[in-house]
Image: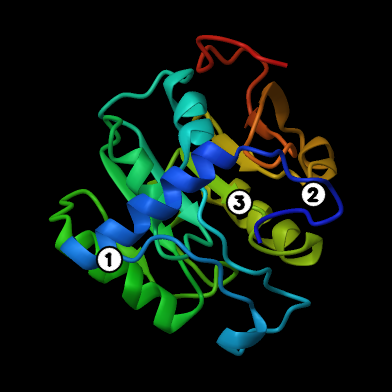
Amino acid sequence: MRNDTSKTSATLPAYALFLRIRAKLERTIIGLDFQGGVTAESLGLDPQKSHDLMPSGDIFLTRVLTALTITSNDAILDIGCGKGDAMRAMQAFPFMKIDGVEIARDIAKIAHRNFSKLRAKRTTVFNVDATLFEHYNNYNFFYFYNPFPKIVMEDVLAKICRANTRGDREIVVIYNNPVCRDLFDEIGFHLLGRFDDRWGNGIHIYSNTTNSQILTSRIS
């Protein structure tokens, strides 16, 4: 979902209107399809293992990325990337790679088509179950927009930790709508900061190191 329906959404009518108008123009003129939510059931996914898809590449994510030290040596993976809206926002930053993992085949195809139309050269969308993905070692930044429940999140976080085989690399996680935030304490990640998001649920920044300097400005 990437939205926690137990909380009241922040009312941002002007911004919501802007997003709707932009999405309509993009579909009509360029043929892009980044917006619009999709339910897990409609995709044939088990709702006990996958949440609904919602776009999150908004000004709130951009503010978070702006507050981080990002270089051309960094690579980010959007886990549960949907149509790629967050990945599009990441294109404005100097990541070496901006990749995504999406379990739903039809949605992964839409994401791939979007980035082909944008001629994005740093981006690959992998149509695979995140628990089966085998290349977490290629990334040091990870983004989640509450893509799945705790039982799956636990498995994916364990794979990310195991991929850091030497244990000397900083791993940074951007967790939008951090429903499973207790898992990060359990595996030894450290909360660096909290940022606002569109819905009022917040975006958390985590690191596997205690002396991280990745966050240049702190909001809590």
Residue type pointed to by label 1 = Arg
Q: Which residue corresponds to the image point at 29% horizontal and 45% vertical from the top-left? A: 97
The tag on residue 145 is 3
Q: Which residue is mark 1?
A: 27
Q: Earlier in the sequence, mark 2 or mark 1?
A: 1
Q: Which residue is mark 2?
A: 180
Query: Helix, strand, or loop for circle 2?
Result: loop
Measured along the vertical axis of the image, is residue 220 above or below residue 19? above
Badge 2, how many Cα within 10 Å: few under 14, some, many 20+? some
Q: Which residue corresponds to the image point at 34% horizontal and 50% vertical from the top-left? A: 22
Q: Marks 3/2: CA distance?
A: 11 Å
Query: Helix, strand, or loop for circle 1?
Result: helix
In percent of width and height, residue 1 lies at 66, 62
Q: Marks 1/3: CA distance?
A: 23 Å
Q: Earlier in the sequence, mark 3 or mark 2?
A: 3
In this rendering, which labeled residue sits more in front, label 2 or label 1? 1
Badge 3, how many Cα within 10 Å: few under 14, some, many 20+? many
Q: Marks 2/1: CA distance?
A: 34 Å
Quadrant of the drawing holding the C terminus? top right
